[in-house]
């Protein structure tokens, strides 16, 4: 099967839309977690959980995508989640 650049880009666009939808879904759950934490007097940052999550993500890897880069992206995702939760306070 022969694909041209336009086909590859269309496939990437579809994947990017899926990633964006998943990030939105994650943010919505993160907001609910923030509401729960606020209601129960729990701190937003759980450093031990974040560390364990990043270690799990890095260990899992993502095929051709370097584990260190994946962990870097997740650090940004976690930071964004904390910011959302802090806005709820």
Image: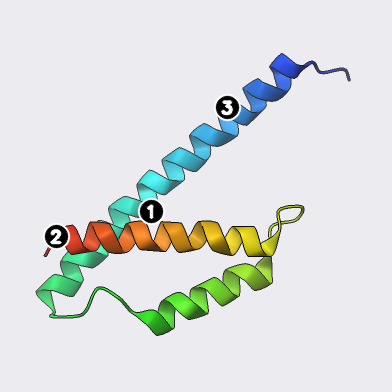
Question: Are dots 1 and 2 in contact, CB under 8 Å?
Answer: no
Q: Cα distance, mark 3 to mark 1?
A: 20 Å
Badge 1: residue crowd in 10 Å (few <14, some 14–19, many ≥20): some
Report the front residue among 85 and 25.
Answer: 85
Q: Which residue in the protein does label 1 denote? A: 26
Residue 16, x across and y down, in percent: 54, 35
Of badges 1 and 2, nearer the viewer stands: 2
Residue at the image point whose x is 33% and y is 52% from the top: 27
Q: Which residue in the protein does label 3 denote? A: 13
Q: Name which of mark 3 and mark 2 comes first in the sequence.
A: 3
Residue 52, x across and y down, in percent: 50, 80
Quadrant that contains the N terminus: top right
Badge 2: residue crowd in 10 Å (few <14, some 14–19, many ≥20): few
Q: Name which of mark 1 and mark 2 comes first in the sequence.
A: 1
Residue 57, x across and y down, in percent: 59, 68
Q: Cα distance, mark 3 to mark 2?
A: 32 Å
Q: How many marks?
A: 3
């Amino acid at each position: 099967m022969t694909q041209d650049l336009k086909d590859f880009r269309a496939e990437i666009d579809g994947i990017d839309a899926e990633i964006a939808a998943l990030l939105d879904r994650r943010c919505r759950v993160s907001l609910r977690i923030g509401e729960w934490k606020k209601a129960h007097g729990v701190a937003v940052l759980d450093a031990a959980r974040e560390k364990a999550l990043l270690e799990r993500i890095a260990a899992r890897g993502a095929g051709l995508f370097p584990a260190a880069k994946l962990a870097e992206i997740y650090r940004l995702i976690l930071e964004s989640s904390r910011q959302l939760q802090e806005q709820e306070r």
